[in-house]
Amino acid sequence: MLTEFNSSVPLAFTPTPLHLLSKLSKHLGGPEIFIKRDDCTGLAGGGNKTRKLEFLIADALDREATCVITAGGLQSNHVRQTAAAAARYGLKCHLVLVRNVDWPDAAYQTSGNLVLDKLLGAEITIHPGGSDRDRIMDELAADLTKAGERPYIIPVGGSNAVGALGYASALLEIHEQCRSLGLSPKALYHATSSGGTQAGLIAGMITLKRPFPILGVEVDGDPAPVTDAIKSIVPETLERLGRFEVWDPADDLQVITGYGGSNYGIPSDAGNEAIELLARTEGILLDPVYSGKAFAGLIDHIKQGKFKENDTVIFLHTGGAQALGAYPSLFR
């Protein structure tokens, strides 16, 4: 499915496990919930961005880049995994971090992913909330070019058609695992924010003639940006997969709202309850920014009776537990 034009480099330990949450499924009275463990991709703690970075870093190397630039919040999982990927392939890494979350724990400013970014050797600049990350990255790239570097800009979240190839490929992996296990899932749920993961999953699903719907649970409190991003990324991703066709978002694009809380990075009560429930039934850690909110959406849909007791659903765990230390007041 991935053509000769789509090179990648190895970063993730794949296939990641797909397994039944037997105790939790019983606790909820069905359906059978299977979890896809992309928190176990392995690079500097794992997470979904590693799959995207296999294609993005390959593109950077193909373009003979000497350094990469990317951006995110102080507790961004994406920038952590980018710093690790750059270290693996001998590229300098520049991180543009923005204080875009107003959270009262002092630890938010100094712990969690930020510590790991520094450990991984990234050059970090921190900017006030509301700063234009794209403009800052462009200006930094211009300065680095003048200094003799060949910078490669990775967009926020690794979310473009190159990065989305990672999740088109992941959808193939999930489909094959389902076939091997004899599963016919009714849906796949996951956290959606910058849009690249969902766009890639949709593109992969289309190439497989739509085996099950992809439901992205919006975690920012505003579905418009991620919806627009997905609409932009899917068509180009399909072209990179050799499928030149008109895509109608109405056929496949499902962004689930109501679980994102007040804003990006601000935990929600339902998300926190979902984190505790999964930790105390299955020993698996979610995070309060992405996966906890998405899992809350899945649990609520189950409680609403959207699935039968003998149905199967998949939850894609995108990682992020490294940020739990930045929210120490949540689970005292």
Image (spheres, grey):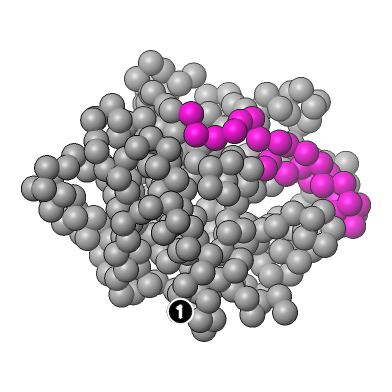
Q: Position of residue 308 (x, y in %)?
A: 85, 46
Would you place residue 328 above or below residue 312 in this image?
below
Would you place residue 297 above or below residue 270 in this image?
above
Q: Kindly state the secondary structure of the residue where label 1 is placed.
A: loop
Kindly identify which residue carries mark 1.
102
Image quarter of residue 133: bottom left
Q: Residue at x 32, y 40 (%)?
A: 91
Q: Residue at x 54, y 59 (%)?
A: 218
User: Quadrant of the image for the C terminus?
Assistant: bottom right
Image quarter of residue 18: top right
- Of all residues, the one furthest to the left in this rendering is 146
Q: Position of residue 110 (x, y in %)?
A: 47, 72
| Residue 179 appearing in the image | yes
What is the three-letter code of the residue carrying label 1?
A: Asp
Image quarter of residue 102: bottom left
- Of all residues, the one furthest to the bottom in this rendering is 104
| Residue 130 appearing in the image | no
Q: Which residues, given as a range, are shown in magenta?
A: 10-37
